């Protein structure tokens, strides 16, 4: 829930925010969930 609130606020403030690499390349091996190891972005 905290991540959803934080990302929603971040995207509202910076609408041009975009990942610098495909999100599939940042996925952590964690059965049952979808977790990122990092989130590099451009503004």
Image (cartoon, helix red, strand yellow):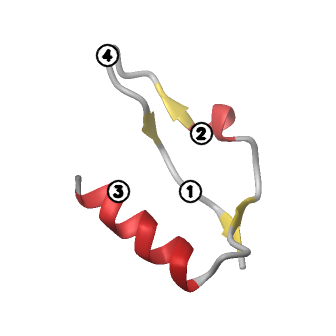
Mark sitting on residue 29: none
Dot 2 alpha-carbon crowd within 10 angstroms: few under 14, some 14 to 19, many 20 or more: some
Q: Earlier in the sequence, mark 2 or mark 3?
A: 3
Question: Residue 2 appears in which quarter of the rendering?
Answer: bottom left
- Determine which residue is flagged by label 4: 32
Query: Which secondary structure lies at badge 2?
Result: helix
Residue 26's label in the rendered image is 2
Q: Earlier in the sequence, mark 1 or mark 2?
A: 2
The crowd level at tag 4 (other Cα within 10 Å; few <14, some 14-19, many 20+) is few
Disc number for residue 39: 1
How crowded pointer 3 is (Cα within 10 Å; few <14, some 14-19, many 20+) is rated as few
Query: At x 48% / y 44%, what residue is drawn?
Result: 37
Looking at the image, do the residues carrying marks 3 and 1 touch, with CB atoms under 8 Å apart? no
In this view, 33 is above or below 18:
above
The answer to whether the residues at label 1 and label 2 have Cβ atoms under 8 Å apart is yes
Look at the numbered discs 3 and 4 and tell me whether their residues touch, using CB distance below 8 Å.
Answer: no
Q: CA distance from mark 4 to mark 1?
A: 20 Å
**What residue would you read off at disc 3?**
4
Mark 3 secondary-structure assignment: helix
Residue at the location (76% across, 58% down)? 20
């Amino acid at each position: 829930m905290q991540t959803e609130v934080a990302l929603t606020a971040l995207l509202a403030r910076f609408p041009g925010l975009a990942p610098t690499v495909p999100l599939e390349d940042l996925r952590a091996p964690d059965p049952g969930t979808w977790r990122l190891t990092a989130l590099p972005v451009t503004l």
